[in-house]
């Protein structure tokens, strides 16, 4: 099958778009967490990083929406994919990153915007918030990377 023929097959095209959604979201999550780690050492960038984190969050949601829509199509057209343990574990992790994303959006990012000005002064509030936010940022990056690596290594997994 040539590349053109392959791309005309909706299964191949939708899987490719699914893959692109994963790259966008995993990329944005990784960039956000790297930025926040950097912020721990270079506190004066808090204002600009607080703004960039909002754009990154948008990219993660756009990636997740793309994954959800294309994933739903792939399951609709091959319902047997949704039966195995692998898929159930993947969906459990998707639920975790989705709920964690809501907490990041509703609680963590707004607070980060509010604290951006006093960040370089390293107040108690900032230190406490940094630890609290770090937990959710870690869940996010680990969840996304686990799913990505699980899919990549699926032929070698015991489930
Ligand atoms: C939102 C819910 C999701 C659904 C319903 C879903 C569903 C699927 C399905 C049905 C497949 C095809 C599996 C097969 O043919 O055996 C697939 C492949 C894949 N999924 Fe997902 N998925 C979702 C989320 C994710 C997430 C969050 C990631 C990344 C972190 C991801 C990464 C991938 C990758 C890399 C592939 C392989 C694509 C390819 O073959 O090019 N998926 N997904």
Image (spheres, rainbow, N blue to C red):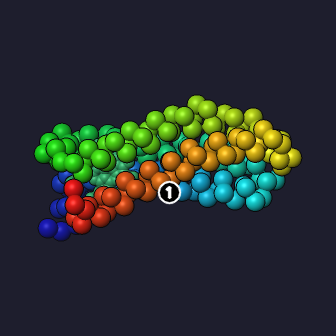
For image coordinates 38% across by 38% down, the residue present is 95
Q: Please provide percent x and percent y for residue 146.
A: 40, 56
Q: Please provide percent x and percent y for residue 47.
A: 76, 46
| Number of numbered tags placed on the structure image | 1
22 or 119: which is nearer to us?
Answer: 119
Name the outermost residue toward the top.
Answer: 106
For image coordinates 77% across by 42% down, the residue present is 126
- Residue under pointer 1: 27
Image quadrant in which you'd find residue 54: top right
Q: Identify the element where label 1 is drawn.
A: helix
Q: Please provide percent x and percent y for residue 43.
A: 79, 54
Residue 120 visible? The answer is yes
For image coordinates 59% across by 52% down, the residue present is 32
* Side of 83 where 122 appears, left or right: right
16 or 28: which is nearer to us?
Answer: 28
For image coordinates 51% across by 34% down, the residue present is 102
Quarter of the image with the C terminus is bottom left
């Amino acid at each position: 099958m040539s590349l053109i023929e392959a791309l005309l097959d909706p299964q191949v095209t939708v899987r490719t778009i699914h893959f692109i959604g994963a790259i966008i979201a995993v990329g944005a999550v990784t960039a956000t967490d790297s930025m926040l780690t950097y912020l721990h050492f270079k506190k004066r960038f808090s204002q600009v990083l607080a703004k960039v984190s909002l754009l990154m969050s948008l990219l993660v949601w756009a990636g997740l929406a793309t994954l959800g829509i294309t994933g739903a199509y792939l399951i609709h057209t091959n319902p047997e994919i949704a039966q195995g343990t692998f898929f159930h574990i993947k969906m459990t992790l998707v639920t975790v990153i989705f709920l964690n994303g809501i907490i990041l959006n509703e609680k963590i990012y707004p607070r980060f915007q509010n604290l951006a000005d006093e960040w370089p002064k390293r107040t108690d509030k900032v230190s406490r918030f940094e630890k609290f936010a770090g937990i959710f940022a870690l869940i996010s990056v680990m969840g996304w990377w686990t799913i990505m690596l699980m899919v990549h290594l699926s032929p070698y997994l015991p489930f």
